[in-house]
Amino acid sequence: MKNKTEWELSWTKFQNWLFKKDTISILVFICAIIIFNKPIEGLLTKLVVNPLLSYCDSSITNDVIFGLLILGLVFYAISKRKKIVANNNLFTLVAVSTLYLYYRTNGLIWEFKPFSILPFIYYADILLFGTGIAFIFWIRIIFKNKQDSSSEGSFFDDEPLSPKKQDELGYNEFAKTIANKIEATNLEKSFAIGINAKWGMGKTSFFNLIKNNLNSEENIIIDFNSWNSSSPKAIVQDFFDTLQEELRNYYSSLSHELIKYSDKLVALSDNTITQSVKATAGILSSDNSVVTLHNEINIKLKKIDKRIIIFIDDLDRLDKFEIIEVMRLIRNTANFYNTVFLVAYDRDYALQAISEHNAHNFQSFLEKIFQLEINLPYFEPRIFKEKLLKNLKELLPNFLHEIAESTLFNQIPGNKDDINFFNWISSMRDVTRLSNSLAVTMQGLYGEVLFKDFLYLQLLRLKFPSVFEHISKNFYSYFITEHDYKYKHFYILKSFDNRHGNNNTYHYAIDEYLNNNSESYFLSKDSINNIMALLKYLFLKQNHYWPEKEEHLSVIYPLHFRKYFAYNLDENSISEIQFTKARAFSQQVFNDLIKSYCEAGKQLELRYRLIDIKDFNSREDFETVITGIFFFANQEAKSPFNSFSKYVGYDPDDLYDKLADYSFSISKKYYNSESSSEAYKTFLLNLFDQAPFPYSFESTILGKWIKRETLELPLSQREAERILIKLFDDYCNQTEKLDSYLWSFFHDCRTFEIVDEKRVEIIPEAAKSIFKDFIIKKDIDSFLVDLIHQDRRNEGKYTLDNFVEKIWKSWDDFIEIIESKKDKDCMYIPEFLEFYKEVKKVGFGNYTNFKFNIIPIKN
C-alpha cells in the first residue's frame, strides 16, 4: 500500500468540491440552460430584450454611463480586495460569461450594442470585465496564501502531520502496519483500538499517517471530534449526525434511521448520563425499538459492504463525564457491523477521569473498551533537538546557526554543571512552542545576549511561566552580586550555608521559596529539581570554565540581566551589534561610537565592554581597540559615572594584560614581519605622541609600568620613563598652577628599589628639575600652601611636610631660594618664613601653634 501522492490528494479535494450540494445545484442549473436553451431564449427575448434592452442604443450618453459602471466596478473590487472570492461564485460567473461569449460571437439570436467611440467593445462586456476582476483577485489570494505559508520569519505551526509534511518521528512504517491489519480484518461487531501517548507526542499525526495508508475506495473514513461537543448528551447526537452525514451517500435511508436511533438514545440517557458503561449496556435490551433500530442499521451496513473506520482524537481534552460517554459509544451504542474505532488519548489522564467516576477496578476499565491498546513507538529524543535546530536555523540569523548547534549538541552527557535538556523538551509540541517563543522574545536581541543563557531561560518561561515572572519581579530576593579580581560584578544565587559536619551543601533562597509554595505553582519535586538545576547552571557557572567567546553577554552580569526578561535593549544598554560593527569599520567610526556612549552617560557599561575584549581578529582590530581604549580613557566623566577624576580613565592592569607581549605573543601574531617588535613599538609610541592634554591617563599607566619588576612590552622601562618625563614637561609648560594633575605626574615618575631590605624611593633627576623649575618660575605660593599640614587633633597646630628634602638638598637651600623671591609677587613667602622658624624650633614633623593670616590653610 502506497502513500497518497500530491496529485491523488488534489483529485480527492476536487471530488469533494464537485459533489458539494452548492456545486451540484450550479451544474444542474447550467445543464438546464443548455438543454432548454430554445424556450429560455424565447422567454428572455419576450420579457427582457424586446421591452427593455432593445431600446439601449449606442450613444455618447450610454458610453459615459457604462464607463462609470466599469469604474464603479473597479473601485468596488479594490475596496473588497481582501474579501475572499468563493469558488462557487467564481464558477457561476465563469459559466455565465461563457454563455454570453457564445451568444456574443454567434450573433444569430441577439444583437449586442457596442460603445459608440469603441465599436469593438459591447456594453454587455461589463460582465466579462467583472468576471476578469474576480478571477484576478482569486489568483492573487491563492498566490498570497502560498507565499504566506512559506514566508520566512513566520510562526511555526502545531498542525499535525499532513501528506505534505515530512514524517520526522519515523511513525509511518508502524502506521502502515496498523492500516494493513485493519484492512485485513472483517468483523460482525466493532473493533476498538486505543492509541496512548502524552500530549504533544504526535497522536494526531499518527492518525493522519494511518489514514494516508488506508484505501479510501474500500473504507469509509470518518473523523469525529468529540471535543467540539458542548455536553455529554451532545456527544451522542453529534456522533450520529457525523455518522449519518458520511453514510447517506452510500445508503440514503440509513441516514434517517441513524437520526431516529440517536434521538432514542438521547431520550433514554437523560437520567443515566453519568452511569457506568456496565449499567448503560442495558439500554440495548431495555427498549425493543432501540434494539430493532440497531439491527436494521447493521443490516444496511452489511449491504454497503465497506469497512467504517472512525477516528476519535483528543479524548484527553474531555472531562470525566464526556470520556464515559465516548466509551459508551464505542462499547455499546455504536457497536456496529465491521466498524473500527481508533481513539487517541493520554492513558493516565483517561484513567484519572474514570477513577473519579467509578473507583472500582478502574485500572482495568480500558481493557473492556479496547481490544488493542498501542503505545506510540519510542523514538530517539535527539529528534527533538534536530527539529529545534532546524526551526532555529529558519528563525535566527546565520551567525547564530553554529552557536545554536553547539548549544544543543555539544552538551556533555552526565555533566552535573549542565541541565538535562529532555527534562524540559519531551514532545514536538514543546519544540514548536519553544521555537515560537524564541521567534517573539529574541527578535530584537540577536547578538545582544548569550544564546545558551537565553534559550535556557526561555525553557523556564515555557514550562513554568509563573515562576519565571516571579523571579523577574523579585530577583533581588534570590540573587546577590559578587565581583571578580577586576571588580566586575555578577549575580549568583543567594544561599544559606547549610554545611554541618560532612553535609557540604548550600541551601538557596529560591529553592526554599519554591518548596514552600509548590502547591500554588503546581510544582512537583522533580519540577523544582529541574528548575534549580537550570538556575544553578546559569548563576553558579562562574566556578568553572566558559568556552563561549560571548561570555560577557551572560545573564549573570547586571548590565545584561534585564535583557533576558524585558526582551529588548533598554536606554542604558550598549548594543553589541552596533559595538562590533563600529569596531570592524574604522577607527573614526569606533571613536565616534565611544564618544556618543560617553555623552549618553554609558561610561561604566562601555568600560566593562572594553574590558571584556580578550581576543583580536587582526592587527587592524588590535590597534583599533587599543586606540579606542586610549580615546575612551580621555573622555570627560559624566553623571552617573563614579570617578575621582574629571576624565573617565581605564583599568591600567587590564590595558597591560592586553598589551603584554609575552613570548612575542602580540608582535608575532599581529605584526608578522622581521621587525615585528619595532612595528609594535612604533604603534605604542604613536599613542603617547598623540596623547591629549592633560595626559593624566597616559601618566597613570606609564607610572604603573615603570614600577613593575619586568615590563613585557616592546618598550623598556627606561623608555617608558623618558616618555613619562616628556609628558610631565609638556604638562608643566602648558599649565600655570600647581594642581592635582601636576602632583600626580610627579608621583607617577617615582620608582622604588629594595636596599638593605628597605623600600627606597627613587625620583629621576629630570623629574626633579622639571618640578623645581615649575615651582620657582610659576606657582611657588601653591607649593608653600601644600607644604603646611594641620594637626587633626588640634586645629591651631601645624607642621611642615618634609617633601622639600626630596627635591632640594636641604631646607636651607629651599629657604634661600624663596627668600630671593620674597619681593617678586609671592605674597605667601613672608608669613611662610615666620612659620618655618617656629617649626624649626620644635623640629620638623612636630606640630606648633601658629595663626595664619594670609596663607589659606587646607583643613
Image: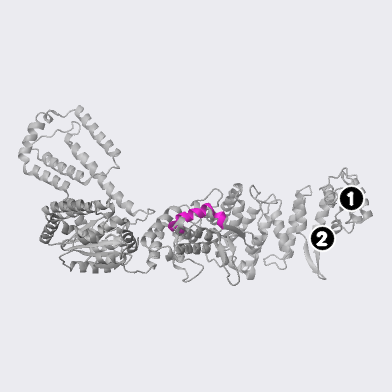
- Residue occupying image coordinates x 78% and y 61%: 750
Residue 817 percent location from the top left of the image: 90, 52
> Which residue is located at x 36 percent, y 59 percent?
429
Q: Is residue 469 magenta?
A: yes
Coordinates of residue 187 in the picture (x, y in percent): 16, 66
Q: Which residue is mark 1?
A: 818
| Residue 398 visible to the viewer | yes
Q: Is residue 613 visible?
A: no
What secondary structure is the stretch in magenta mostly built from?
helix
**Element type at mark 1:** helix
Q: Residue 118 location, x and y as percent? A: 19, 34
Taking 292 as reference, is 605 left or right? right
Q: Which residues are magenta?
A: 460-478
Q: Is residue 83 magenta?
A: no
- Give the left or right position of residue 98, taking residue 447 as reference: left
- In front: label 1 or label 2: 1
Q: Amino acid at mark 1?
A: Ile
Q: Which residue is mark 2?
A: 765
Q: Secondary structure at mark 2?
A: helix
Q: How is the image coloured?
A: one colour
| Figure check: 84 above or below 121 | below
Quarter of image, res 317: bottom left
Q: Residues within 10 Å of mark 2 (few under 14, many from 20)?
A: few
